[in-house]
């Protein structure tokens, strides 16, 4: 390893451990205080002591206010690459009695080793023990996801600042809230046009530094990801006709309807899609519950369903249209089945029951101004909630009551924030960057005696969906009108910048879990060099 790479590796390790020791669970006061700790640390480095105006924060959200940290290292010209990552983490609760050590990587790793050696293990624990005993993996809440990625970005920034005459500029950003609804990245995205004007920058590309997982030898983690998966959260609010349990055919079973919708949606392979040579997972049901309090012998008239639908190509309009078709078919199947059961039970033909499917936008169109105002007030009262499905469920239930909807009927829409699919192939500039990165990737792999490859789709939901992505107005409008809560809608202002992005980050295993661990040799030795050379290649005229 060259001296330059050794310095970057030591710096990446130092920063990774330091930042992991600063707790920053999403939504906590620690998350809000993290940005000032990071800004103050960077302010003491030689470059930013000389150029303090190039290090600043951008407000994001919350009380106390969470902030994005922005650090610019200038070279020559206007061409600029943005290095980005998030600093918030998931909860430390699943560490149990080891929670006090959760953010102290080296003591935690030793404590986990001691625990794993003390008892019988399942397969996942056996793998974790083997990894820890190898000495190549380090534990810590947020070390993998993704403070070691941030550390690599800072090491790259400092290496770039040390060049005699760097070509182009590097803009480093660290954002909060990725683990909730990407409010940090979205606020940074909205501020980026003004930052570019202020410093006269032409942003030509971005490198997201998020972590990936690999259960084998790391080949899935030693990768440059060319895109990030899209996510939709369609809901179905089922309205049946309640009846006393002793007279089941005098009503319509909301549970039967919901069961047919779930059967038609949950893990159905044909509902996945294929693009870029890879296939997305099929949709899964995230929540299914009836909407009532207390107990009686009346059948429930309302059932809520929410699904997670990951995509490689589908648009919002396609998803909503496909979902409507599926729901309408499932509704009719449920009604026909119950009619058939009634005919066999009563031993006479039953009238054919008809149902209705409405989008949330169509439901709102049935309401007067006073009802809409009441829904807006309800939305504001719920806007601080962190569970998007609960917030959406309460608003849809209130809207259905305001409209006086009688079952059988199903209201459909989107229950949570949409994460857009992004990929380099969406623009010519992206394809050019991929060509440059091919050479960088090959050289870095040879230099470090390892393998690095392109992967098409980063499978985890990430800030990359909003990083350099300018959403289409039509898609934004459709999502906004069919998402019950404004808090879970992306309000993208005019004038956003658009530039191609890739993900180059650390790899490890079991992120968000007790055994979350980061592969240190790749993350400290290879990653900073790969990110640096990638940025330099993309900055070249």
Image: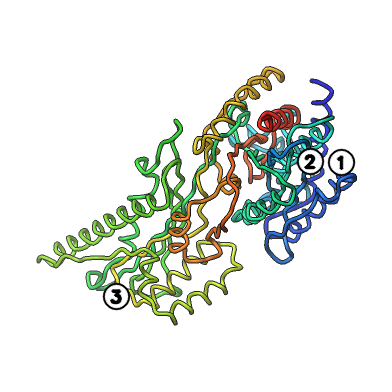
Disc 3 is placed on an element classified as loop
Disc 2 is placed on an element classified as strand
The image quadrant of residue 138 is top right
Query: In the visual, does 324 lie left or right of 347?
Result: right
Q: Position of residue 438 (x, y in %)?
A: 60, 24
Camera-side residue of 187 and 31: 187
- From this view, report whether residue 203 is shown above or below residue 451: below
Q: CB of mark 2 within 8 Å of CB of mark 1?
A: yes
Disc 1 is placed on an element classified as helix
Question: Is residue 113 shown to the viewer in this render?
Answer: no
The residue at which mark 1 appears reads as 47
Query: In the visual, does 83 lie left or right of 461?
Result: right
The residue at which mark 3 appears reads as 244
Q: CA distance from mark 2 to mark 1?
A: 8 Å
Camera-side residue of 28 and 48: 48
- From this view, report whether residue 232 is shown above or below residue 237: above
Residue 73 badge: 2
Q: Residues within 10 Å of mark 3 (few under 14, many from 20)?
A: some
**Which label's residue is closer to the chain start, 2 or 1?**
1
Camera-side residue of 254 and 218: 218
**Which label's residue is closer to the chain start, 2 or 3?**
2
The residue located at (72%, 27%) in the rendering is 526
Mark 1 or 3, closer to the camera? 1
Q: CA distance from mark 2 to mark 3?
A: 71 Å
């Amino acid at each position: 390893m060259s001296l330059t790479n050794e310095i970057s590796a030591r710096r990446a390790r130092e920063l990774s451990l330091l930042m992991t020791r600063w707790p920053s669970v999403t939504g906590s006061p620690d998350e809000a205080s993290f940005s000032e700790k990071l800004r103050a640390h960077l302010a003491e480095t030689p470059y930013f002591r000389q150029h303090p105006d190039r290090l600043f924060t951008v407000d994001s959200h919350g009380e106390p206010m969470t902030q994005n940290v922005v650090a610019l290292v200038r070279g020559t010209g206007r061409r600029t690459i943005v290095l980005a990552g998030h600093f918030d983490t998931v909860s430390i609760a699943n560490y149990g009695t080891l929670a006090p050590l959760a953010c102290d990587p080296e003591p935690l790793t030793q404590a986990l080793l001691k625990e794993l050696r003390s008892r019988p293990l399942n397969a996942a624990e056996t793998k974790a023990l083997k990894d820890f005993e190898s000495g190549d993996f380090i534990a810590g809440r947020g070390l993998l996801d993704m403070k070691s990625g941030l550390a690599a970005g800072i090491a790259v920034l400092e290496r770039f600042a040390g060049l005699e005459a760097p070509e182009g500029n590097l803009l480093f950003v660290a954002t909060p809230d990725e683990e909730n609804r990407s409010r940090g990245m979205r606020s940074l995205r909205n501020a980026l046009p003004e930052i570019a004007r202020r410093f006269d920058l032409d942003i030509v590309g971005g490198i997201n530094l998020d972590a990936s997982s690999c259960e084998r030898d790391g080949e899935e983690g030693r990768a440059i990801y060319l895109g990030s998966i899209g996510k939709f959260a369609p809901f179905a609010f089922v309205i049946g006709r309640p009846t006393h349990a002793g007279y089941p055919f005098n009503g319509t079973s909301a549970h039967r309807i919901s069961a047919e919708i779930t059967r038609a949606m949950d893990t159905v392979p044909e509902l996945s899609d294929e693009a870029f040579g890879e296939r997305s997972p099929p949709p899964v049901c995230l929540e299914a519950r009836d909407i009532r309090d207390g107990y009686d012998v009346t059948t429930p008239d309302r059932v809520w369903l929410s699904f997670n639908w990951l995509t490689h190509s589908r648009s919002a309009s396609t998803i909503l249209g496909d979902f409507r078709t599926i729901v309408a078919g499932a509704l009719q199947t449920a009604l026909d089945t119950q009619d058939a059961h009634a005919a066999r039970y009563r031993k006479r033909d039953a009238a054919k029951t008809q149902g209705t499917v409405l989008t949330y936008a169509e439901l709102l169109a049935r309401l007067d101004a006073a009802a809409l105002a009441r829904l807006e007030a309800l939305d504001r009262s719920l806007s601080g909630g962190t569970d998007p499905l609960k917030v959406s469920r309460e608003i849809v239930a209130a809207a259905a009551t305001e409209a006086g909807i009688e079952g059988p009927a199903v209201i459909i829409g989107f229950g949570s924030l949409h994460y857009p699919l992004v990929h380099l192939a969406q623009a010519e500039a992206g394809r050019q960057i991929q060509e440059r990165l091919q050479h960088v990737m090959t050289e870095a792999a040879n230099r470090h005696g390892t393998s690095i490859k392109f992967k098409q789709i980063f499978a985890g939901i990430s800030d990359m969906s909003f990083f350099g992505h300018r959403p289409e107005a039509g898609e934004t409008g459709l999502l906004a009108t069919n998402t019950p809560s404004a808090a879970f809608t992306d309000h993208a202002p005019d004038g956003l910048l658009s530039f191609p992005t890739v993900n180059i980050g650390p790899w490890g295993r079991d992120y968000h879990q007790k055994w979350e661990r980061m592969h240190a040799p790749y993350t400290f030795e290879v990653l900073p060099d790969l990110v640096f050379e990638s940025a330099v290649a993309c900055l070249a005229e």
